[in-house]
Amino acid sequence: MKDRLNRDDIVYQIYLSARNNSSQHKLKEAINNAIKSDNQKLSEPLWISYNSEIVPSSEMPELSIVDYLLWSLQRYILKGQKRFFNALEDKYDLIIDLYYFDNEVELRYR
């Protein structure tokens, strides 16, 4: 969510697909940490409004698609297995590596 919650004139709706260890507390903590980190770079902090919810995939099947895209990217990065990533490569628009500290690397597709 880095640099994505950048407007204080709207209310963000943030959803997380339900899993065995999903918790509303962890989701809110991650969102608040992202907002705090982004605000540290600004001369005047933004007051970001959001609603967050953990939902079963049966209610929002589109989250399964996002989850699969992230899983294929994770498998490529952590295990070097390109098969799933290569099959979906044209579906990614932007990938930002947040852990590359020398320079922020953005991989753009299309």
Image: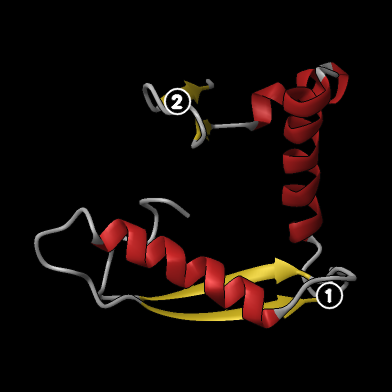
How many numbered circles does the render carry?
A: 2
- Few, some or many residues within 10 Å of mark 1 (<14, 14–19, 20+): some
Q: Earlier in the sequence, mark 2 or mark 1?
A: 1
Rendered image coloring scheme: secondary structure
Q: Residue furthest front?
A: 101
Q: Is residue 88 visible?
A: no
Q: Secondary structure at mark 2?
A: strand
Q: Residue at x 64, y 70 (%)?
A: 15
- Few, some or many residues within 10 Å of mark 2 (<14, 14–19, 20+): few
**Disc sitting over residue 56 in the figure:** 1
Q: Nearer the viewer, residue 61 or 73?
A: 73
Q: Secondary structure at mark 1?
A: loop
- Distance CA(mark 2)–CA(mark 1): 31 Å
Q: Residue at x 48, y 27 (%)?
A: 100
Q: Nearer the viewer, residue 29 or 86?
A: 29
Residue type, numbered disc 1: Pro
**Disc sitting over residue 106 in the figure:** 2
* 54 versus 82 height, above or below: below
